Amino acid sequence: MLLKAHPGHPRTSATTAALVQEALAEAGAPLGTFALFTGHESGVTVLRDPRVKAAAFTGSVRGGRALFDIAASRPVPIPFHGELGSVNPVVVTPGALAERRAEIVSGFVGSFTLGSGQFCTKPGILPLPRDPEAVEEIAAEVRAAAPAPLLSPQIAEGFRRRLAELAELADGPRARTLVESTITVDADGRPQAGPGLFLVPTVEEFLKDAANLLEECFGPSAVIVEHDGEDEVSRILDRLEGSLTVTFHTARDGQSAAGLGALVEQAVAKAGRVLFGSWPTGVAVALAQQHGGPYPASTSAHTSVGPHAIERFLRPVVYQDAPAELLPPALREENPLRFVRTVDGTVEDTTPVP
């Protein structure tokens, strides 16, 4: 396995790689099972190497699509599991807003500013029932949030460009800037970003610039879209491209969830993970995790987080009617490795006999 280090944290990458190599050596893995390398051009060279049989990537749509095209244009194309852009809408019902307004306000701001907005599951769009007071409460929390570091000058420049696109839109009648984001440099030369917030007052105005507003902004910035009911939320979701997540906040008595079936079906068609009552930046490394979604959220049907992520780098092989002595240990009748296996449709009990 070859891993390209992110330029935003080279020393962390090197330290982690040393720990991985040490653990593999202790487990008896062959020398060279894992290696770390650096550099953009090196990454492209590795991707084109015929010895590489699959690749995975997390980053921008632009960069990921360029790498995807390289992987697909090789003389022998290879799978490319890209995790690209996602805006992760959070839909709030009137019942939820009335029931736990303060919790939703602080939860949203905390989620989209977490890690200075550099989580791929950051909620970037908030369809919110029309409520000027709630909007102002969100804006007040955003203004109070402290600036936080961005990973690299390149990410800071990308964030600056995206903010300029949103600010240009906000100069007109279709949107306005509620909180202007700031990008500064600290005493050590590291970029810092203060969070920003934009408001689109109607769904009609949102739809006129949906392609722009539904493009990911990698950094601490979000867009509120005020709406007047579920039909308008449906129109927003209809324009949504593939997303890692869609979140719903409903009243906990269940009544405001009763009529959301159609919206949930829309969300399932657009996202790999549909959440209820929580925030998408919480990503558990668990068996049930699905961290992916339709393009451009991902170029793969596989999750990139959790135990099943390994399936991106496995190729199924069937041994049909093979002699027992030619089977790998995991497939032999005695199951010497004590793997949990399914045999004739039944999961084997691998509990050791006392």
Image (cartoon, grey):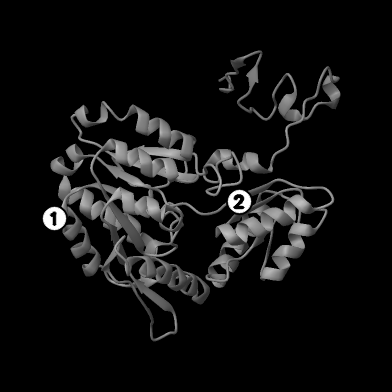
- Taking the spot 71% from the left edge, 45% from the top edge, the residue there is 79
Q: Is residue 21 above or below residue 207?
A: below
- Helix, strand or loop for disc 2: strand
Left/right of residue 255 with respect to residue 203 in the rendered view = left
Q: Which mark is residue 29?
A: none
Image quadrant where one finds the C terminus: top right
Q: Quadrant of residue 322 in the image?
A: top right
Give the residue at mark 2. 82
Q: Which mark is residue 133?
A: 1
x and y percentages locating residue 93 in the rendered image: 23, 39
Q: Quadrant of residue 136 in the image?
A: bottom left
- Taking the spot 23% from the left edge, 69% from the top edge, the residue there is 143
Left/right of residue 275 with respect to residue 146 in the rendered view = right
Amino acid type, label 1? Glu
x and y percentages locating residue 245 in the rendered image: 43, 44
Please state which of residues 120 and 167 is positioned toward the viewer in this rendering.
167
Q: Is residue 112 above or below residue 13?
A: above
Please state which of residues 296 and 330 is positioned toward the viewer in this rendering.
296
Please state which of residues 260 and 83 is positioned toward the viewer in this rendering.
260
Asked if the residues shown at circle 1 and circle 2 are in contact, with their CB atoms under 8 angstroms apart, the answer is no
- Taking the spot 37% from the left edge, 55% from the top edge, the residue there is 124
Amino acid type, label 2? Gly
Left/right of residue 290 with respect to residue 95 in the rendered view = right
The Cα atoms of the two marked residues, 1 and 2, are separated by 40 Å
x and y percentages locating residue 222 in the rendered image: 34, 59
